[in-house]
């Protein structure tokens, strides 16, 4: 039984200095420079890390604001 290669970017089977996209059954005409996939992965990892930090910071800030508001009931009096 042959193992199936998952879709993705792989070195060009013709030996050209680029990556070619394998759709799971056939090679497509889409190509990118050899470092394209590496750069994309780095960028998505940086974005992912930024979102995690931003969400964490917003959560902590929200807790601090709620703690401040609930600790001083006079803030709610007119």
Image (spheres, rainbow, N blue to C red):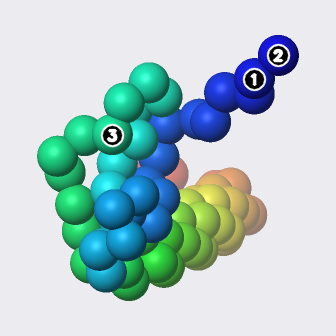
Q: Which residue is mark 3?
A: 27
> Residue 15 location, x and y as percent?
37, 71
Q: Which residue is mark 2?
A: 1
Question: Which of 21/50 is in front?
Answer: 21
User: Reading the chain from its start, which is encountered first: label 3 or label 1?
Assistant: 1
Quadrant assignment for the N terminus = top right
Q: Is residue 30 above or below residue 58?
A: above
| Residue farthest toward the left in the current orientation of the protein | 29
* Residue 65 visible (yes or no): no
User: Which residue shows up at 48% across the image and 28% down it?
Assistant: 24
Q: Tag on residue 2? A: 1
Q: Is residue 73 above or below residue 8?
A: below
| Residue farthest toward the top in the current orientation of the protein | 1
Q: CA distance from mark 2 to mark 1?
A: 4 Å
User: Which residue shows up at 34% across the image and 62% down it?
Assistant: 14
Q: CA distance from mark 3 to mark 1?
A: 17 Å
> Residue 65 location, x and y as percent?
58, 66
Q: Number of numbered discs present?
A: 3
Q: Is residue 34 above or below residue 1?
A: below
Q: Residues within 10 Å of mark 1 (few under 14, many from 20)?
A: few
**In the picture provided, is 47 more to the left or to the right than 55?**
left
């Amino acid at each position: 039984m042959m193992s199936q290669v998952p879709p993705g970017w792989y070195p060009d089977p013709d030996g050209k200095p680029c990556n070619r996209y394998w759709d799971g059954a056939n090679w497509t005409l889409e190509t990118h420079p050899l470092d394209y996939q590496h750069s994309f992965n780095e960028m998505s990892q940086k974005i992912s890390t930024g979102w995690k930090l931003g969400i964490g910071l917003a959560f902590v800030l929200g807790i601090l604001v709620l703690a401040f508001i609930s600790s001083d009931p006079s803030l709610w009096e007119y």
